[in-house]
Image (cartoon, helix red, strand yellow):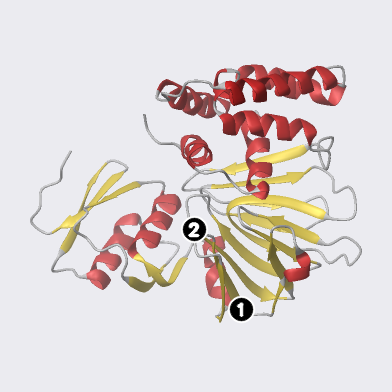
């Protein structure tokens, strides 16, 4: 099976317990109507390839889920969830998904707020106007979720991927972006957040205004950012790095350009895959970890981008071949393995 976006997200859930913020985003995405066929296919594939027997703890978790469903099944706001839960009964044998359903029902913070799901496929970008007038540009391969109406003391949105925010000022109602690892809290400002589920790093780049960045929902230990600063958080190392940058350069993707500053070859290729909606296979003999700086203009094709990249890496040693939407990056003289 082709590893589509739904499959990669679900496989990530099963292989590694996500943070509470990530679970919040994923559980809402999982039951959404959009891309339902893709999600069904991914769940079926995972189910067919799972050789796990249910133990007592799994049955207890499932029983607890059914118990909670009975408690709320008469409530109109929960009927849609119960209907959709039936669709995913088989996957409940996996403890992680069972845990997500229990958590969804017990979470009261925004359960009665209608949420809007925006999934931007590879090769596309989308601009969204939020209920408060804030503008969000969502990059390719990203999932963005926001309430149809901001209720309460905070304006909370959820991001898995990359987006650029221009937030309307409201000192009485702070704006919070929740990603897989961090929370970004602002009043009114312009900034960029990159937080793809498959990547270790979450990167926040501030153009103007001020933001506070923190993790574990603990704003008391926040880092205050100033304009033209970039904060990188590594979830593996549990480490923050703050640096000075030309912030506007990191938002050029909003106009179709790509800018890479000291990025590894692997990071560059992942971005090219999302931007051009292609699959790039790299020979294991090619070094993934060297860092490069380059810029791709909005009018340049994937072939233009690859030609520039090869010149920067080493045109005497590597080349590429294409087969439809699949690209092979390999040492010169080596045949493509199929």
Which residue is pictured at 7% across the width and 56% down the height?
Answer: 333
Where is residue 131 shown, x and y percent of the image?
Answer: 82, 50
Q: Nearer the viewer, mark 1 or mark 2?
A: 2
Q: Secondary structure at mark 2?
A: loop
In the figure, 237 relative to 159: above or below?
A: below
Return the residue at label 2: 200
Q: Is residue 316 visible?
A: yes
Disc nearer the start of the sequence (1/2): 2
The quadrant in which the N terminus is found is top left
Q: Position of residue 126 (x, y in %)?
A: 60, 50
The answer to whether 312 is drawn above or below residue 91 in the figure is: below
Residue on which the image places disc 1: 229
How many neighbours does mark 2 have within 10 angstroms: few (below 14), some (14-19), or many (20 or more)? some
Residue lying at 77% horizontally and 65% vertically, measured from the top left = 219
Whether residue 237 sits left or right of residue 87 in the image: it is left
Q: In the structure shown, which secondary structural element does the residue marked by tag 1 occupy?
A: strand
Question: Residue 79, percent across and down?
Answer: 79, 20
When the figure is inspected, residue 122 is found, relative to residue 164, above or below; the finding is above
């Amino acid at each position: 099976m082709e590893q589509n976006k739904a499959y990669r997200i679900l496989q990530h859930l099963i292989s590694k317990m996500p943070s509470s913020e990530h679970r919040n985003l994923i559980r809402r995405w999982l039951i959404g109507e959009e891309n339902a066929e893709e999600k069904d296919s991914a769940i079926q594939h995972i189910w067919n390839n799972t050789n796990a027997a249910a133990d007592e703890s799994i049955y207890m978790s499932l029983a607890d889920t059914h118990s909670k469903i009975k408690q709320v099944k008469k409530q109109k706001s929960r009927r849609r969830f119960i209907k959709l839960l039936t669709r995913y009964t088989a996957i409940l044998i996996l403890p992680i998904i069972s845990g997500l359903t229990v958590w969804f029902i017990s979470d009261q913070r925004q359960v009665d707020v209608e949420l809007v799901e925006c999934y931007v496929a590879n090769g596309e970008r989308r601009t969204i106007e939020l209920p408060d007038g804030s503008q969000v540009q969502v990059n390719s391969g990203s999932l963005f979720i926001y309430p149809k109406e901001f209720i309460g003391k905070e304006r909370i949105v959820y991001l898995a991927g990359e987006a650029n925010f221009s937030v309307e000022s409201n000192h009485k109602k702070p704006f919070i972006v929740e990603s897989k690892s961090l929370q970004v809290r602002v009043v009114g400002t312009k900034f960029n957040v990159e937080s793809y589920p498959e990547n270790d790093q979450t990167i926040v780049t501030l153009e103007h205004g001020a933001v506070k960045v923190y993790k574990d929902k603990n704003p008391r230990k926040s880092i205050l950012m100033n304009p033209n600063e970039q904060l990188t958080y590594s979830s593996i190392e549990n480490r923050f790095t703050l640096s000075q940058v030309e912030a506007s350069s990191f938002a050029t993707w909003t106009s179709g350009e790509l800018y890479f500053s000291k990025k590894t070859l692997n990071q560059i290729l992942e971005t090219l895959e999302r931007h051009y909606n292609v699959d790039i296979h790299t020979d294991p003999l090619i070094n993934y970890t060297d860092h490069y700086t380059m810029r791709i203009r909005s009018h340049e094709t994937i072939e233009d981008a690859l030609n520039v990249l090869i010149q920067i890496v080493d045109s005497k040693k590597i080349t590429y071949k294409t087969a439809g939407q699949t690209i092979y990056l390999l040492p010169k003289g080596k045949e493509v393995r199929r």
